[in-house]
Image (cartoon, rainbow, N blue to C red):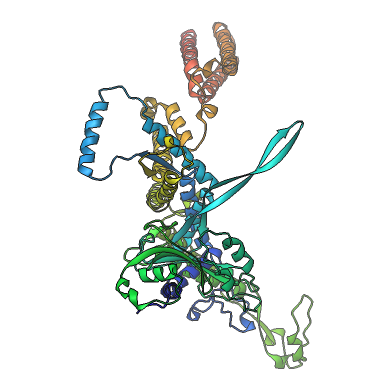
Amino acid sequence: MQSASLKDFIIELFRDYEANRQIIEPKWRKNWEAYKAVTGKRLDQKIGLGNKDSDDPDENDWRSRTVADITRVKVNAGKILVSDVLLSGGEIPMMLKENRNIGDVVNTVLEQVEKDSTDSLRSEEISPVSENVLKMTKLIKEQLKRGNAEKVLRNAILSAAVYGEGVSRIVSNTYTFRRFNPVGESWKSDTVEDFGLKLEPVSVWDFFTDLEDNDIHHNAGLFLRTRMSRFEVMEKFRDDPLLIKGSLERINRDRISESGPIDSSESPGRLLINKRKKDLRVLEFWGRVPEYLVQNMEQNQEFASTGLVESENEQTEIMAVIVEDTIVKFSRIENGTRPFFRVYWESGIDDIHGQSIADNMNLMQDSLNSFMRCFEDNKKLSSNILLAVKPSMLENPVSLEEKIVPGKVYKLSESARSASEAIQSITIPDIGRSLLDGIQMYEERGNNNSMIPEIAYGIQPGGSTTATEVQMRNEKAGKYISDIIKGFDCDWIEPVVRFFYEWNMDDPRVPFTFKGQYDIQALGYHSYQDKILRMNRIRDMLSMALSNDALFQKLNLNSLLSEWMKANELEPDLFISSEGSMDSPMVQQFAQSVEQRFAQLEQQIQEFSRQLPSLVLGSELEAEERQAKIEKLKAETEKIQSDTVNAGDKARTERAKAIAEIQAKSRENERREQEVL
């Protein structure tokens, strides 16, 4: 069936995409509620306590509406782990390299092998091509910084962790800067403009595409839906070179409502807004349309003519903007140049959407919510007074309607023999311990299902978890994060950098010495390998060395510590002492004080040893006292030896010789004492 016009074709395609996406939106909304910890979520009433329905009568308001925040914690932890790797250096991890693999791959490889063998005979020199690569790499990195790439990438990471996918786009932008220049003894400012590219985040709720083909650059098409006020529409499109003349004047101006329409497919945050001023729906379309509709549009014909039916099967790639029911912007574009980029957290196999951390936590989230609500409800019942009252035993039964307060007096009827016949308390058993076991079980399952254990974000696991289990979980979590990072390398960093590279190659302002046939290499996974995995391996080696004396003697401890600090973005020179630190005044002063103390102890031992012959003629008690003093001095010597050893490996090496001599002399004195006695 032929569409009457290009506008009708595009709007009908959008309605189809909007209808197809309704199968995904409940999942997104559930993930958003779990991440935001929205309270009052309705659960199955058959569970009993722990479920709060917004339609329940007021007498059930006491029930808990608590939502466990485990999904939020896991999502934020995953976002931080990925962001810390991809943006650890403050810039997008990427590089350019010369690409000779163009055309016939067999001949290209043969030429490359011959060139490498020839170059190996000559000394290595930096070629002009290599210098061009460095220049273009530097230019793209500066453009990415100016284009807000870091912030947009963080947004894509969070969106993918919550919804399963993150979407970004590139637009052209005019940058305005305020420049200050010295004029005499004062400063004056002027403005400088520069034209370039800019990255923008796209909400998954405003992004519609063909669910039958996940390749958003070559499928049937995609839409970006936004809401604008009439003023914003005029400001944005009135000076656009692709504006269709008279289109802005044809926009429907008859709407008199105070706020714009509400679509069920809008984001949860926008649905909370009641009074809306952005009442115009703007659809930006990038995709393929029948050629005959494009020709009619270019010829300013409103309806298709029968003479173009033979070109019905021909399709053309276009870009068009529709405000309400009017096309205001239209242009043919090259295939594969759609400036949108989508990345999945996990690519679902044979599925139409990605898998997120929130998706992995859904089952645990629901069960954990129920257990926590049951726990709170049970505590409210078991820790508060519940009374059973027999009104006939009260003189004034109306007094039961009053609140119970300290000092409250109830008058019993004459027939009541005791207060227990009229009022008795009811005890609700406290089953909190069994509920805590359930909460702990589902928290543990949450760690397993999310593939992000607690140790990965700095929390030491409790319970009976052994150190080996903790290490294995951390290692598996690292491999899981590395796989996620590979996805961001392939689906976000590489295509974004390629877009900037091709833009620069077509830009006449970029010097010829910057340009060349380059290939883009995303370095997110390499950064992860260099930082996280390398750091973990070095840490394991340090742990082994500290627990094994033989291995400790063979390892270069300073080198290991230096590499570990570099992986943690620390400066080794500031924290590791140099080899010449033994010559520092502080260390030398400590060593001198120790030597002086040993010398004093040695003199005292020798003095007592010289007096031992006269002890034979004295009393045995005095001899024992003097012998005890000698033992005390020996103990003090051993204590100083122990303190000296703990002072540091380097200082211990310098003092080892002195300690050995003192010990030898001490043994010699003991031998002399035995001979005298």
Snapshot quadrant of residue 611? top right
Q: Eyeballing the image, is 674 above or below 476?
A: above
- Compared to 386, does 203 lie above or below? above
For image coordinates 70% across by 41% down, the residue present is 189
The percent coordinates of residue 517 (x first, y second) are 35, 41
Q: Percent from the top left, x then y, of residue 265?
A: 50, 73
Residue at (49% x, 52% y) in the render: 153
How far from the left and from the top, in percent, is residue 152? Answer: 51, 53
Q: Does 209 sit left or right of 326 as displayed?
A: left
Q: Which is more toward the observer, 180 or 392?
A: 180
Rendering quarter of residue 610? top right
Residue 359 visible to the viewer: no
For the point 21% across and 32% down, the residue is 114
The total of numbered circles placed on residues is 0
- Quadrant of res 524: top left
Residue 559 percent coordinates (x, y): 43, 28
The one of 522 and 216 positioned closer to us in this rendering: 216
Quadrant into which the N terminus falls: bottom left
Q: Is residue 494 left or right of residue 458?
A: left
Q: Nearer the viewer, residue 616 or 505?
A: 505
Residue 564 or residue 519, whichever sits in front: 519
Residue 78 visible in image: yes
In the depicted structure, whether residue 548 falls above or below residue 294: above
